[in-house]
Amino acid sequence: MASIPPEPSSEDSNAALSQSLWADKYRGATIEDLDPPPALSVKPSDPISHALMSAFERDYTHLTVVSQENRALLGYLSIPRLKELLKEGKVKENDPVEQAMLKFRRKGKVYKVITMDTPLEELEAFFNGGVNGSGAQDFAVVTDGNRRFVLGVATKSDLATFVQRRPA
């Protein structure tokens, strides 16, 4: 006796449609196709003025913060947020970066590893908070597969620019 497969739910249809739209939009592209610039890292003890100057020279909106001892990724600096903190007087330009950096929470958290081979569909889902229930993200730290080296930073605007430049 043959069984009839169940009708797909609207949730299944929406997920399939979303995947289809992504597939059409990105057509198999990966983060490597974004050609992200190399990450610029600062140390927690660096003065904020050094971090600001480095970011402005390269027109970066996010800098990674790495350990002085072993270059382990500790957190990041959001330059727009840093400007607000300076304007509000919460930090000064001669303060160390560690007073303004946002630290990564490591305990009990599963991180999405994002590499140069990560499909852009996954990057968009990461930005929209659809990965591990992490909430919406402004940028992604791109690492090697073993998470030993920071290779670059990809932002929402990088993704939007890629889509705009790509012919239909």
Image: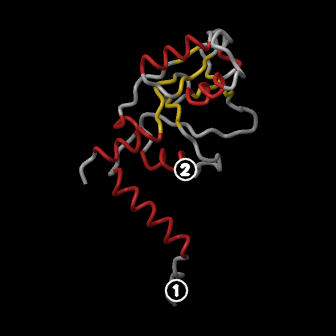
What is the count of numbered marks?
2
Pick the front one: 164 or 123: 164
Mark 1 lies on residue: 3
Describe residue 65's horizontal placement relative to residue 37 as left or right: right
Residue 90 percent coordinates (x, y)? 72, 22
Q: Is residue 105 visible?
A: yes
Placement of 161 over or under 50, stated as above or below: below
Q: Secondary structure at mark 1?
A: loop
Residue 32 percent coordinates (x, y)? 37, 34
Q: Quadrant of the C terminus?
A: bottom left
Residue 128's disc number: 2
Q: Quadrant of residue 80?
A: top right
Residue 56's disc number: none
Describe residue 132's horizontal placement relative to residue 143 as left or right: right
Residue extending furthest toward the left: 167
Q: Given contact means CB atoms under 8 Å apart, are the residues at marks 1 and 2 in contact?
A: no
Rate crowding at label 2 as few (under 14), some (14 to 19) or many (20 or more) other CA atoms within 10 Å.
Answer: some
Tell me what residue is drawn at x 50 percent, y 28 percent. Answer: 61
Residue 131 percent coordinates (x, y)? 59, 49
Rate crowding at label 1 as few (under 14), some (14 to 19) or many (20 or more) other CA atoms within 10 Å.
Answer: few
